[in-house]
Image (spheres, rainbow, N blue to C red):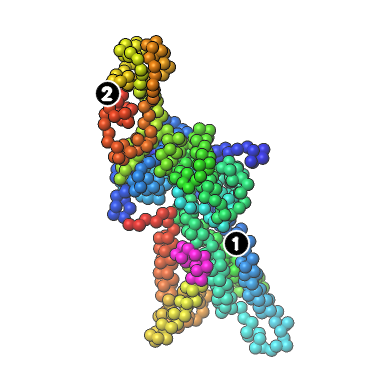
Amino acid sequence: MTPVIELQDLRVKLGRREILKGISCRLGTSGAGKAIGLLGPNGAGKSTLILTMLGFHKPAAGSARILGFDCHTQSREVKSRVGYMPENEALIADMNAVRFLRIMAELSGLPARVALEKAHEVLFHVGLGEARYRPLGTYSLGMKQMAKLAQAIIHGPELVILDEPTNGLDPAARARMLKLVAEMKNEHGMNILLCSHLLRDVEEVCDEVVILKDGAVVHHANLEEERRANRRFVELEVAGDDRNFAAALSEHGAEGVNEGGGRWRIVLPPQVELDILWHLVGRENLDVRRLTHRRDSLEEIFLKAVGHIQRTTGDSAAPAEEVAANGRL
Amino acid sequence: MAVYRRGYQRYQGPLTGRWDRLFVLPRFAWERLMQQRLVAIFFVVATFWPIACALFVYLSHHLELLRGFGDEVAKFLQINGEFFYIFMSAQAVFAIILSAFAGPSLVAPDLANGALPLYFSRPMTRFTYALSRMLVLVGVLSPVTWIPGVLLFLMQSGMAGWTWFTENYRLGLSLFFGFLLWILLVSLVALASSAYVRWRMVAGALVLGIFFILAGAAELANEVLRVEWASAMNPARSVNQIWRAMLGLEPFPGPDEWQCAICIAAMTTVLILIIQRKLRPVEVVS
């Protein structure tokens, strides 16, 4: 299957500085309607990567392909399949939203009559229906973000690039924006590339995440797999005589390590549900003090990737695949 | 179903052609310009001189109406290259003023509001963007330049007959191509000004300034340095010299039409470079 984004040793120089230093990755290989999070500290090269994919910067070496088309040599094909919501102000202040969206839709190739219909349709969709004839300059920050989203999706692109879509939004507007983004991928089958500093937003919406640091990819994770893997790792604290508990666990193919004081670390096999632990604890007459899943938050993944947390095997925050590869706790 | 009820659906229908899209920006811009009362008034005012010239052509073929004024008037009422040159010179001034009104509102708002990334993230290049913005000015300036000029020429041809037309078709071509050259220069000045200063009012003033101040500066340089070549710095004067050559008239003193053409080509190149440099989706600070 053609990946949504494919980067091969992509190098981009701005002036004499090399901003992207040979990035290679394949993103969005698991079908349509996926969201990819693009993360990285300031100056990591996220914006440069986005602008290169839009054909605004010429790669010094390597290539970037979107939906199978080269971003530099087949820029027209790429741009007709992409919607872009920039981070900065980009709306023409003295123009009303309907007119602005009509222009953007027609420039994307929609016939004039369809463009007018779509302008109204998409403005209602993002919640600007009542304000659609107001000049864009009179919009609040949240409304402007919605208007930028509207222009990015008016032509029904296959990939929507969102650069900090929840910047400056209050909690209600942020929730609405994330709901719209989730709808775009789940109901309309659009692929999303979400660049954000807000890790919770990325965690909430994205299926995959790629982390950049100093112009290089330092981590690429499938969040869905991480979540699934995390569900298999359990920390349990019990009171009572737990000497037979390890044997009880092994009856169901689970492995457990007693850390003393009633604290256990357990790995459940993929087909075994968590309920079995409650059953075993009851059978062994143990009292449960605490039961937690290990949960690698995106923040932990991010901090490890950019080097703010040391990677150690056996650390509870270690990536799931590393522990699983060892096969033991 | 009402649009607010049916919800968003991805568009997956046919797309318009590449050349159709070129006219999207001009269409919206013309619509917007025509809503401005000042532009509408200016269009009306710009028709006065062509109407006066049409009357002149009519009278030149109906001298019996002027029998009481004597032979001197009959000599004055001649339709030749000089007549069309005077017509072109007057309309050229209208073209400058109109471009100072219309030009800055085309690019400056896009730059000032940072809208270029939205345009260029669509299937649109810098060239097609600049071309479609220029088409706006071509559309606005044509009704005050070559269209009345060619109509005037056709009117004269109709009244004077086929022989006059075959002997003077060069005048018609000169009107058309001479005005096209002027439209190109004026449009580039307007686009470059609005791309450079980004502020609509200042850009409009700059358009007028480039033509009128350069004219003054060229004359000043000629006087101070006691030379004639400085006239080439004046774009209007240079184009006028080219027009005179095209219409087969006696040239002005100073740089000839070829030297003026080189100056105009150099100015055009500089203006294109300014536009190319300024119309970028992102600024790169190296």
Q: Residues within 10 Å of mark 1 (few under 14, many from 20)?
A: some
Horizontal side of B273 relative to A261 (left or right) equals right
Residue at point 30%, 20% (across, down): A261
Where residue B159 appears, as percent x and y from the top left, is 67, 73
Where residue A41 appears, as percent x and y from the top left, is 35, 45
Q: Residue B51 falls in which quadrant of the image?
A: bottom right
Count of number-bearing discs: 2
**Magenta residues?**
B190-206
Residue at point 38%, 29% (across, down): A295
Horizontal side of A268 relative to B133 (left or right) equals left
Q: Nearer the viewer, residue B49 or A278?
A: A278
Q: Chain under label 2?
A: A
User: What's the residue type where badge 2 is placed?
Assistant: Asn
- Secondary structure at numbered mark 2: helix
Residue at point 31%, 24% (across, down): A324
Residue at point 64%, 41% (across, down): B3
- Secondary structure at numbered mark 1: helix
Residue on which disc 2 sits: A326
Answer yes or no: are tags 2 and 1 on the same subunit. Answer: no
Residue on which disc 1 sits: B33
Horizontal side of B134 relative to B155 (left or right) equals left
Q: Is residue A117 visible?
A: yes
Where residue A105 appears, as percent x and y from the top left, is 55, 47
Q: Which quadrant would the C terminus of chain A be assigned to in this image?
A: top left
Q: Which quadrant would the N terminus of chain A be assigned to in this image?
A: top left
Q: Residue A197 falls in which quadrant of the image?
A: top left
Q: Main secondary structure of the magenta part?
A: helix
Q: Is residue A120 visible?
A: no
Where residue B33 appears, as percent x and y from the top left, is 60, 62
Number of the front mark, 2 or 1 = 2
